[in-house]
Amino acid sequence: MRIKIVLEPQSGEVTLPIQYNYVIQSLIYRTFSEDLAQKIHNIGFKFEKRTFKLFTFSRILEKGEQKDNKLVFRKQISFYFSSPFLDIVEDIGKGAIASTNISLLRQTLFISGIEVIAPPKFGTANLIKMLSPVTMHSTLKKADGTTKSYYYKPNEKEFSKLIEENAKKKYALVKGADTKDLSLELKPVHFSVKENLCVIKFKQTPIEAYTGIFELSGSKELIGATYDAGLCDRNPGGFGMWEIWKK
């Protein structure tokens, strides 16, 4: 389930750092009820050796004006929030409605609107646009025993394979269903490795992610799971949200 949250500033504008993912994630956790925030942050949802938070959010939908390494937004900011669990979406919705004033980097805002977004009708092949960049990585061990993250490019064969494995885990976790006969494939359509690369710092960690237009095809069950929970890695950090692309 997906909702749109709209926030308006009392001062007439909102100023955010260019790398604002962690700021929005922190706002989301503060809007959750205390019990749910602690459950998701500290425990999450476990599947085999993996732990998922099972929510994601978009980039800010408005275009900000860049000034001195900051982004200035006029009138309002808004973003989409999504989770496959209705109670998580309802919780943040109730928290948003109950909040009269919200502090965001010492700026006072109020939530002026919450909109429930009707889910699209999925086909077995869909052209999609990333609302927050997609990322997929593996942790590799170096010869000296230390580790490093390798971020896959969308035109690498392993990228789509790992996304399918990730989506199957999410679907099995949410639905408790067998995924053996399900499949998922992601292919770049309007895409350039150079032009669509975004290096986003999250808690000072640089993450390589990609915007662009892709073809998402396969089983509707997995397509729906990625619509609600996000494609790929790091969804609760604001990665992997998509919408059907309308030319």
Image (cartoon, rainbow, N blue to C red):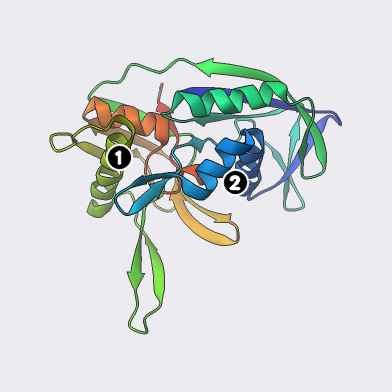
The amino acid pointed to by label 2 is: Asn
Asked whether residue 66 appears in the rendered view, the answer is yes
Q: Residue at x 39, y 73 (%)?
A: 147
Q: Earlier in the sequence, mark 1 or mark 2?
A: 2
Residues at circles 1 and 2 in contact by the CB criterion of under 8 Å: no
Q: Residue furthest front?
A: 35
| Front position in the image: 43 or 116 | 43
Which numbered disc covers residue 103?
Answer: none
Packing grade of label 2 (10 A; few <14, some 14-19, many >=20) is many
Work out which residue is located at the far left of the displayed protein and give it: 181
**Distance from Cα at disc 1 to Cα at disc 2:** 22 Å
Q: Which residue is mark 1?
A: 167
Identity of the residue drawn at 60% across and 23% down: 93
Q: Amino acid at mark 1?
A: Ala
x and y percentages locating residue 81 in the rendered image: 53, 30
128 relative to 118, above or below: below
What residue does disc 2 label?
A: 21
Counting from the top left corner in percent of width and height, residue 202 is at: 57, 55
Q: Which x, y percent locates residue 1?
A: 45, 23
Secondary structure beneath label 1: helix
Is 54 left or right of 12, judged from the image as shown? Answer: left
Position of residue 220 relative to residue 56, above or below, is above
- Residue appearing at x 51%, y 42% in the figure: 40
